[in-house]
Image (spheres, rainbow, N blue to C red):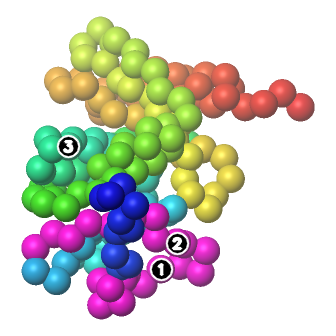
Amino acid sequence: MSFLRRKPKLPPALRPALEPEERVLTWAPVGDGQALVATNRGLWLPSGKRLGWHEIHKAAWSGRELRITPAEVAEERDDYTVLVDGPVDAFLLLEPGDLPDQIRTRVTRSVAYTSHHPLTAGGVRVVGRRVSGLNGLSWAVRYDANTPVTLDAVVELTDELVSAAKGATTPPD
């Protein structure tokens, strides 16, 4: 009756330094003496770095390999950040348990608003994401390839699109 078997507890040696209100949801071993650990706040990598759920741009599961693409800040603007894909981290998971499902659920749940807008050259996606432990949304944009991101007209239009998205998601008083 394998469905009654519980996954072993995370060994203390693999437990990351959690914040006071952070709790382990699930984990999976990766290599010798390392693990990926999912918490209510994000995904702890074997390197000891935690990616908040809002900081993961893509997560792809092949059935054996988990590929995580973090979002990196390319530029800080007044009311939002401009994000680009960071280097992909790939992990072979021989005993994944429910880690891939938990990652998909948490990353998806962090997205409160998303909208793509074609521009004269390229396009921009406006995203409002929930950040665990904070009220309100964190706003960011991701430009399509070949979009002239520093062109004044593109920056002004992006500012307007983010402002409109914020207005559409702000509850009325």
Front in this rendered view, residue 72 or 133: 133
Q: Secondary structure at mark 1?
A: loop
Q: CA distance from mark 2 to mark 1?
A: 7 Å
Circle 2 residues within 10 Å: few <14, some 14–19, many ≥20: few
In the image, 103: left or right of 137? Answer: left
Residue 52 versus residue 117 in the image, above or below: below
Say which residue label 2 marks.
Answer: 23
Residue 86: x and y in percent read 21, 51
What is the total number of numbered labels drawn onto the structure image?
3
**Disc 3 residue type (three-letter):** Trp
Q: Which label's residue is closer to the chain start, 2 or 1?
A: 1
Q: Which mark is residue 18?
A: 1
Comparing marks 2 and 1, which lies closer to the viewer? 2
- What segment is highlighted magenta in the picture? 11-31
Q: Residue at x 61, y 22 (%)?
A: 164
Instruction: State which quadrant residue 125 falls in.
Output: top left
Residue 76: x and y in percent read 42, 50
Say which residue label 3 marks.
Answer: 61
Circle 1 residues within 10 Å: few <14, some 14–19, many ≥20: few
Instruction: State which quadrant residue 137 falls in.
Output: top right
Residue 120: x and y in percent read 29, 9
**Disc 2 residue type (three-letter):** Arg
Q: Secondary structure at mark 2?
A: loop
Do residues under tags 2 and 1 come within 8 Å of each other at their CB atoms?
Answer: yes
**Disc 1 residue type (three-letter):** Leu
Q: Which mark is residue 52?
A: none
Front in this rendered view, residue 163 or 125: 125
